[in-house]
Image: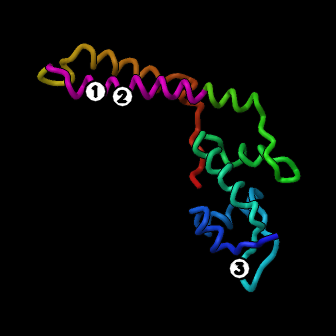
């Protein structure tokens, strides 16, 4: 089997060596040894990194992504989890669409000041209610990687 050192994996995948080391530390990846001081990985690490990137783009945490791989390292994707994430993305798309529409309205509103615009004031009330809702307070941002 062809081996790649950490520099080659980084170059081919676009993932910095520091991130590769972190992924190995938390169990998302495993090196197969070292050549001198450089970690060696099997070539199949590249599709795994692509799946990790796809999971991150979809909004999965690194913990959730690590649970998507079976003990043998092959993807073992939970269909219910994927459906739940797709539903969450649909909600986010609706919220972002509403936000975009509000920004366009504010940018084009003929009122002398935004605070004199009834539509803008209604949108502010809606936004403040959402920000103060119990579900918004429960959501905690994930630590960046």
Could you tell me how far apart the alpha carbons at marks 3 and 1 are, in whole angstroms? 52 Å
Q: Main secondary structure of the magenta part?
A: helix
Secondary structure beneath disc 1? helix
| Residue 70 on image: x %, y % | 85, 47
As drawn, the label of residue 48 is: none
Classed neighbour count for the residue bearing mark 1: other residues with Cα under 10 Å, few (<14), some (14–19), many (≥20): few
Residues 84 and 128: in front is: 84
- For marks 2 and 3 on the same chain, the one whose residue lies earlier in the sequence: 3
Q: Is residue 58 positioned above or below 15 on the image?
A: above
- At 67% from the left edge and 72% from the top edge, which residue is drawn? 6
Secondary structure beneath disc 2? helix
| Residue 3 on image: x %, y % | 76, 72
- At 79% from the left edge and 46% from the top edge, which residue is drawn? 75
Residue that badge 3 annotates: 38
Q: Which residues are magenta?
A: 88-110
As drawn, the label of residue 104 is: 1
Could you tell me how far apart the alpha carbons at marks 1 and 2 are, in whole angstroms? 6 Å
Residue at the outermost bottom position: 36
Query: Which quarter of the figure is the N terminus placed in?
Result: bottom right
Tell me if label 1 and label 2 are in contact, CB under 8 Å: yes
Residue that badge 2 annotates: 100
Q: Is residue 129 left or right of residue 142?
A: left
- Residue 141 occupies quadrant: top right
Secondary structure beneath disc 3? strand
């Amino acid at each position: 089997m062809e081996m790649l050192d950490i520099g080659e994996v980084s170059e081919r995948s676009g993932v910095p060596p520091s991130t590769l080391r972190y992924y190995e530390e938390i169990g998302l990846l495993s090196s197969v040894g070292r050549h001198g001081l450089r970690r060696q990985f099997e070539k199949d690490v590249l599709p795994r990194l692509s799946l990790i990137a796809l999971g991150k783009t979809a909004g999965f945490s690194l913990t959730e992504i690590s649970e998507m791989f079976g003990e043998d390292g092959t993807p073992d994707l939970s269909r219910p989890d994927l459906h739940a994430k797709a539903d969450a993305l649909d909600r986010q798309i609706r919220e972002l669409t509403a936000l975009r529409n509000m920004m366009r309205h504010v940018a084009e509103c003929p009122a002398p000041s935004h605070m004199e615009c009834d539509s803008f004031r209604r949108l502010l009330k809606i936004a403040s209610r959402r920000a103060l809702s119990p579900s918004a307070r429960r959501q905690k941002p994930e630590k960046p990687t």
